[in-house]
Amino acid sequence: MKEDCLPSSHVPISDSKSIQKSELLGLLKTYNCYHEGKSFQLRHREEEGTLIIEGLLNIAWGLRRPIRLQMQDDREQVHLPSTSWTPGRPNCPPKEPSPQDGNITAQGPSTQPVHKAESSTDSSGPLEEAEEAPQLMRTKSDASCISQRRPKCRAPGEAQRIRRHRFSINGHFYNHKTSVFTPAYGSVTNVRVNSTMTTLQVLTLLLNKFRVEDGPSEFALYIVHESGERTKLKDCEYPLISRILHGPCEKIARMFLMEADLGVEVPHDVAQYIKFEMPVLDSFVEKLKEEEEREIIKLTMKFQALRLTMLQRLEQLVEAK
């Protein structure tokens, strides 16, 4: 069902499914009651008869392969100090940036202000929806994982080495040695989206927020249930609508970012057996084998009886002639 053909009383879930607007508003009310007093409450409005819901969407990292951060910044501007150039000295080299300059720093992320990748659309409301600072938790298995504690003082050679390798890109600290890493599994980030944004658009927004070099076609969004059931969101689906339909509690269902070629859907019939211990699963397999053997015996006896009946009938026809 195309969105243009939908009646005004319905809201599209995908290109072929829709939900009544009144039912969705009821689910939205429950969602906001669950998040009462928090920044995850969703707002809604209508534009030309179309219901639009907007707010923060939580997405957990579920990657198995490392990602690469971009080095270049499409909004990067070069700021030259006032003492780096004078009209009478065109060949004078610029001053080497110091740790206090905005584009190169020798300090860690905790000592610098982190800029938001997506600006808030409404800052005058009573409840400020502050999107989280773009930070990625690294897995402990990464070879590039750096220590949480930094020495209070550094040798001049070490400080110079860090200045060569760490840059501030849109508020993200780029390090040549740690630019390729795997985000910690299950760590949560969020992006500001609305109900008209498709899965591909949400993926693009999330990757741009953290300046990830990999393209959105290499990833997919999955709804992972507490039972182990896993459903992939299609490109034509709307993640914010899907989040509302699955309820506000992330202990029951969470949205994960995974690789498109590594993520596997797990249907409900399979998920109900995932949490059983191996001895229990082995007993299930044995019972299924026994049941399969009984069915094979039944079918064999049935067709043998039919074959005997057909042979007897043929003999009667021959004798009748």
Image: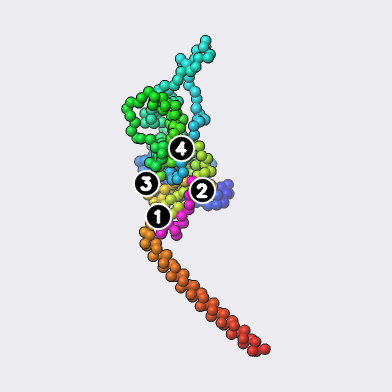
Give me the C-alpha separation between circle 4 and circle 3: 37 Å
Dot 2 or dot 4, earlier in sequence: 4
Q: Secondary structure at mark 2?
A: loop
Residue flagged by tag 4: what amino acid is it? Val
Pinpoint residue 38: horizontal percent, then vertical percent: 37, 40
Residues at badges 4 and 1 in contact (C-beta under 8 Å)? Answer: no
Residue flagged by tag 3: what amino acid is it? Tyr
Q: Which residue corresponds to mark 2?
A: 261
Q: Looking at the image, which residue sits at the far bottom?
A: 320
Give me the C-alpha separation between circle 2 and circle 3: 34 Å
Dot 4 or dot 3, earlier in sequence: 3
Q: Which residue corresponds to mark 4?
A: 180
- On-image quarter of the C terminus: bottom right
Residue at 43 percent across and 29 percent down: it is 166
Whether the magenta-drawn stretch holds residue 242 is answered as no
Q: Which residues are magenta?
A: 259-274
Q: Which residue corresponds to mark 3?
A: 34
Give me the C-alpha separation between circle 1 and circle 2: 23 Å
Q: Looking at the image, which residue sits at the far right?
A: 321
Q: Nearer the viewer, mark 2 or mark 4?
A: 4
Above/below status of 93 relative to 77: above
Dot 4 or dot 1, earlier in sequence: 4
Residues at badges 4 and 3 in contact (C-beta under 8 Å)? Answer: no
